Structure formats: structure tokens, C-alpha cells
Image (spheres, helix red, strand yellow):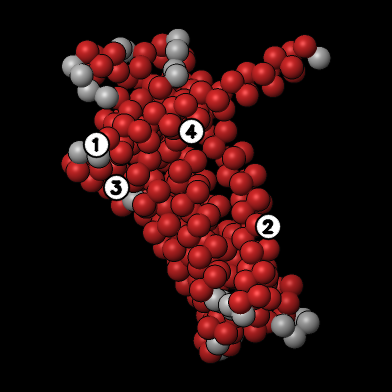
Amino acid sequence: MRYWLLKLYASFVGVGRWAICLRDTTQSTFKRLPSYSLLLDQLYQIGVLSLPVVAITGFSTGLVLAAQAFYQLGDKGLASATGLLVGKGMLTEVGPVLTAFMVTGRVGSAMTATIGTMRVTEQIDALKTMSVNPLRYLVAPRVISSILMLPALTVFSAVTGIFGGYLISVHVFGMAPEAYFNPMPAEITTYDLAIGIIKALVFGFLISTIACYQGLNTKGGASGVGRSTTTSVVVAYSCILIINFILTVSLNSLHIVLQDYLGWR
């Protein structure tokens, strides 16, 4: 029992330290924005270099969603809903979550390993000696770039997923292209797009801040870097799943309120 209480206490302490790191990073960023070259490099590392893995993930997920939808709905006369299911699922749920997972595995782990290695080799202390703020130099560009690029990657994943669903539905199952696409304009709304983008913004923030925090608090040499990297990925995955549920319930409840009181579709 005492062990679990200590673990719970350590978790609360970690959340508090993460919040303090976030506060200090925000303050240093607003005092002076990070270098444009650093920001551009991170935008390229996080966004452009993640396109292949995001495309493969989105495309294969669209194939699976379309196949499952067709098999489950076809014998009930609802095969025409295949395209709608793929489009809505990729845009609001599957696309944001899987994109966040891929970015966590490819980018978040690299952030932790890079900053953690700099910590254990005392490079961060050297930056402080040269009057360089490590939060502005290392953390801020990664956080800003993640928040900017995750929505774009999520939309790209959704588009590739819809395209993958189209290929298998039309060329394998023999659906008419019109039957696949026609339900989408009527049923997929601007609010669905907003849900996906909001989730991506939150996930980008979580991935980058958790990864950087773990890197900054790395101890114990090379083995410590490995532990920090593993911890950052596991914590980020867990937070993505929990926050995704909270956002889904909250945003859809808000949508109902907007429909009832403002008539917003």
C-alpha cells in the first residue's frame, strides 16, 4: 500500500514540475521569441519528415475502416454509408489519435533523447553558462512547431485515409464513386473538422511538453536517457487516450448546445 501511495505522490510531484516547466517556457517565449532558424528546423523535422509515416498510417487505416464497414453494413443494405463512416471516423477520431501516436513515436522520443543526452553530458549547463536560455533555445521551438504541425498532419492523414477507403470500396467491392462520396458533404460538417483540429492542437502541445520535460529531467547517463525516452512515450500515449475521451465528450456536448440554442449545424 505504501508503495502505491509513494508512486501516486511522485506522479503528483511530476505533474507539478511539468506545469512549472510549462510556465517558465511560456514566460521565456513571450519575453523573446525563439530564433526563426530554430523554429524552421523543427517545423521541417516534425512536419515534413513525418509525412511518409502519417501517410502510410492514414492510408492503411482507411483501407481497414472501409473494409470493415462494407462487410458489416453491406448485408444490411447500408453499404452506401461506408464513405461517410470512413470520412467522419478519420476526421474526428482515428486520424487525430493515430497521427498523434505516430508523431509521439517518431518525434516525441527523439525530443526526449536529444534533450536528455544534452542534460547528462552537461551541454544544457554549458548553454546557461553562455547566457542562453535552454527553455527558449530547446523547448519553445519544439512546442510551437508541434502545435502548428499536428493539425496539418491530421488533415493529411484524414485525406489519405478517405482516399484509401475510396480505392478499396470502388475498385475491390465495386461501389460507385458517387455512392462513396455523396453522403460526405451533407453529413460531415465544419464542426467535425474543428473537432479534429482542436484535438490535434491539444495532442501536439501534450506530446512536445511531455517529451521536453522528460528530457530536461533526465539523470543517470545513457541508461537514464533510455528510461526517460520510454517514460515520455508511455505517458504521452496514456494522456492522448484519456484527453481524447474528454475532448470527444466535451466537444460533442458543446455541439448539441450550439445546435439547440444557436441553430449552428
Residue 105 x %, y %: 47, 40
**Marks 1 and 3, the one that precedes in the sequence:** 1
Label 4–label 2 contact, CB within 8 A: no
Which amino acid, mark 1? Arg
SS under mark 1: loop
Which amino acid, mark 2? Val
Q: In this view, does 185 lie above or below 159?
A: below
Which amino acid, mark 3? Leu
**Marks 4 and 2, the one that precedes in the sequence:** 4
Rounded to the nearest whole Å, what is the CA distance between mark 3 and mark 4?
Answer: 18 Å
The quarter of the picture where the C terminus appears is bottom right
- The residue indicated by pointer 2 is 249
Name the residue furthest front: 261
Name the residue furthest right: 1
Residue drawn at x 65%, y 84% is 80
- The residue indicated by pointer 4 is 210
Rounded to the nearest whole Å, what is the CA distance between mark 4 and mark 1?
Answer: 22 Å
Q: Is residue 135 visible?
A: yes
SS under mark 4: helix
- The residue indicated by pointer 3 is 43
Residue 244: image tag: none
- The residue indicated by pointer 1 is 32
**Marks 4 and 1, the one that precedes in the sequence:** 1
Residue 222 x %, y %: 41, 14
Which numbered mark, 4 or 1, is in the foreground of this view?
1
Residue drawn at x 46%, y 15% is 224
Residue 124 x %, y %: 30, 18
Rounded to the nearest whole Å, what is the CA distance between mark 1 and mark 3?
Answer: 19 Å
**Marks 3 and 2, the one that precedes in the sequence:** 3
